[in-house]
Image (spheres, helix red, strand yellow):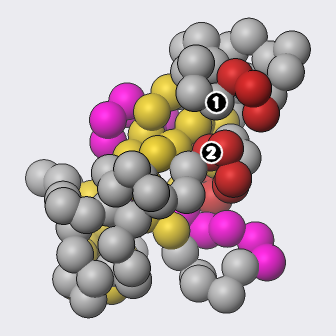
């Protein structure tokens, strides 16, 4: 199946996405891109999926806001992305860590 239906839970992507909004995420057959909104699994979490914006991809320098939580890591490693929510108070890679690309369910079009 190429498309996955996702319901937004919470306000981490506000003002772009809203709590309760229904989305279609297309499964990726390529590496995620910067600024793309992705849906991914977080192991051992009560919510089955998270929705965030890609801030940095493999090979990019670790963003300044993330560097203190990844001491000695100069760039995003292969197979991972750094994520951030559109709402400044949302969780991001500082709390969630880098996202393994194998956990990405899909990308939201037009967000």
Checking the image for residue 93, the label placed there is 2
Give residue 46's position: percent from left, percent from top: 67, 87
State which quarter of the image contains the N terminus: bottom left
Give residue 85's position: percent from left, percent from top: 41, 52
Residue 3 visible in the shown view: no
Left or right: 111 as drawn, with respect to 61: left
Q: In the figure, 110 relative to 50: above or below?
A: above
Per the rendered image, the range of residues in magenta is: 30-44
- Element marked by disc 1: loop
Rendered residue at 13%/53% (across/down) = 110
Question: In the figure, residue 47 lies in which quadrant?
Answer: bottom right
Rendered residue at 66%/44% (across/down) = 94
Asked if the stretch drawn in magenta spans residue 31, the answer is yes
- Element marked by disc 2: helix
Q: Along the line of sight, which residue is nearer the eye, 97 or 64?
A: 64
Asked if the stretch drawn in magenta spans residue 36, the answer is yes
Q: In the figure, 111 relative to 64: above or below?
A: below
Give residue 6's position: percent from left, percent from top: 35, 80
| Disc 1 target residue | 66
Left or right: 82 as drawn, with respect to 7: right
**Mark 2–mark 1 CB contact (< 8 Å):** yes
Q: Which of marks 2 and 1 is nearer the N terminus?
A: 1
Give residue 76's position: percent from left, percent from top: 66, 23
Q: Taken as a whole, is the magenta stretch helix, strand or loop?
A: loop
Q: How crowded is mark 2: few (under 14 residues within 10 Å), some or many (20 or more)?
A: many
Residue furthest out toward the front: 89
Left or right: 109 as drawn, with respect to 67: left
Q: Along the line of sight, which residue is nearer the eye, 13 or 100?
A: 13
């Amino acid at each position: 199946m190429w498309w996955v239906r996702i319901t937004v839970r919470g306000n981490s992507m506000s003002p772009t996405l809203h709590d309760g909004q229904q989305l279609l995420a297309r499964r990726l057959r390529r590496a995620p891109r910067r600024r793309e909104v992705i849906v991914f699994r977080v192991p051992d979490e009560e919510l089955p999926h998270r929705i965030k914006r890609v801030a940095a991809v493999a090979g990019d320098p670790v963003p300044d806001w993330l560097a203190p939580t990844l001491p000695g890591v100069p760039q995003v490693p292969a197979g991972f992305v750094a994520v951030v929510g559109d709402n400044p108070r949302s969780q991001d890679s500082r709390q969630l860590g880098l996202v393994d690309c194998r956990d990405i369910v899909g990308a939201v079009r037009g967000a």
